[in-house]
Image: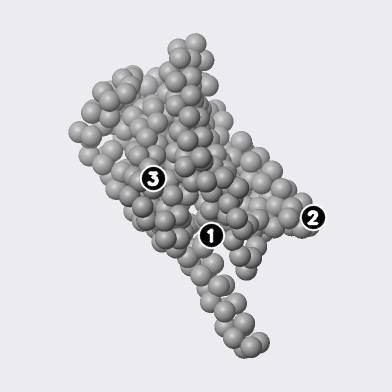
Amino acid sequence: MTARKRRVSNVVFVQILLAVALALASAVCYSASAVLQHREVADHQSGGLHLVARLVRRRGWWTAIAASCLGALLHLAALGSGALLLVQPLGVTALVFALVIHARMTRTTPDRPTLLGAACIVFGLPAALSAIPRHSASVSPVLGYWVVAAVVAVLAVVLATGAIAIRHRLPRAAPVLYAVAAALCFGFTSGTAKAVWLGHTAPTVIGAGLLAAAAGVVLTQHAYRDGGLGAPLATLTLVDPLAAGMVAVLALGEPISTTPLHLVIGLAGVLATAVGVVLLSPRSVIAPHATAARASLAGPETARSAA
């Protein structure tokens, strides 16, 4: 019996490693997609379906969507190997990868706040993940899937409507609202994907997940258009795992460790990760890099207009 338990433990450990590797690879794809999407939408002032109609004629935007699709496939594979509460937080690393890609594109060196923020994420994220038990069985969901779906839908509509209303009066707040709404949609989509892995394959469930993903893509374009790369990507990266965690606990019954030590370490990790996201997100750090990237890639005419 002991040998059998050891074999089961080894299999679980391998599954966790595979889930982590796939989730990190997915984060790289998503970060590349974010940089490309920002580059494509940065010079467009239109919104709604007109913005999407202009983007679908651009090859760079389709490259970004292809990267997102590859990231989504890797993410689905990771969800098949590990818990949603384990896989989704690893998406935070996309912010670090995106800044590395930006630095390479603009041929710049990250400054001290950027390096400190990256360190906070690198060390804080494992601490946050320590609150997730390895062997605990699922518990009874607190709420049903459709109740969570309704809450997410209402919040996303309210946030998007608010962003439209304040876009001209509060230009820095509007993209954050768009990004929060998009993150809720993406987190719900990941929760739906995990539900499908668990055998909930009703067409209505799959349709709800696909609809949420499409809404998230549209909301993301508006966030990058109005707010550049930094604040929207940071918001997406931080809110997405929180939304997915809400779905995991409330709708899927995934457990979290409630022992005092694990809670303290986990909360400290969440705090460190949040600090890292804040350090990486200021417009003063990222926006100049974005402008330089557009200028170097689009030529002297764009450089003059950006200035």
Please report contact status of discs 1 and 3: CB closer than 8 Å, yes or no: no
At label 2, which amino acid type do we have? Pro
Residue 263 showing in the rendered view: yes
Crowding at dot 3, Cα within 10 Å, few <14 / some 14-19 / many 20+, comes out as many
At label 1, which amino acid type do we have? Ala
Of callouts 1 and 2, which one flags the residue occurring earlier in the amino acid sequence?
1
The residue that disc 1 covers is: 83
Of callouts 1 and 3, which one flags the residue occurring earlier in the amino acid sequence?
1
Secondary-structure class at tag 1: loop
Residue at x-position 69% and y-position 43%: 271
Residue 78 showing in the rendered view: no
The residue that disc 2 covers is: 260
Please report contact status of discs 3 and 2: CB closer than 8 Å, yes or no: no
Residue at x-position 49% and y-position 46%: 145
| Cα distance between the residues tagged 1 and 3 | 18 Å
Residue 102, quarter of picture: top left
- Name the colouring of the figure: one colour
Residue at x-position 22% and y-position 39%: 59
Residue at x-position 48% and y-position 15%: 166
**Residue 187 location in percent, x, y?**
48, 44
**Residue 13 location in percent, x, y?**
57, 72
> In the rendered image, which quarter contains the N terminus?
bottom right
Which circle, 3 or 2, is nearer the viewer? 3
In-front residue for pair 56/154: 154
The residue that disc 3 covers is: 209
> In the rendered image, which quarter contains the C terminus?
top left
In-front residue for pair 26/13: 13
At label 3, which amino acid type do we have? Gly
In-front residue for pair 13/5: 5
Which circle, 1 or 3, is nearer the viewer? 3
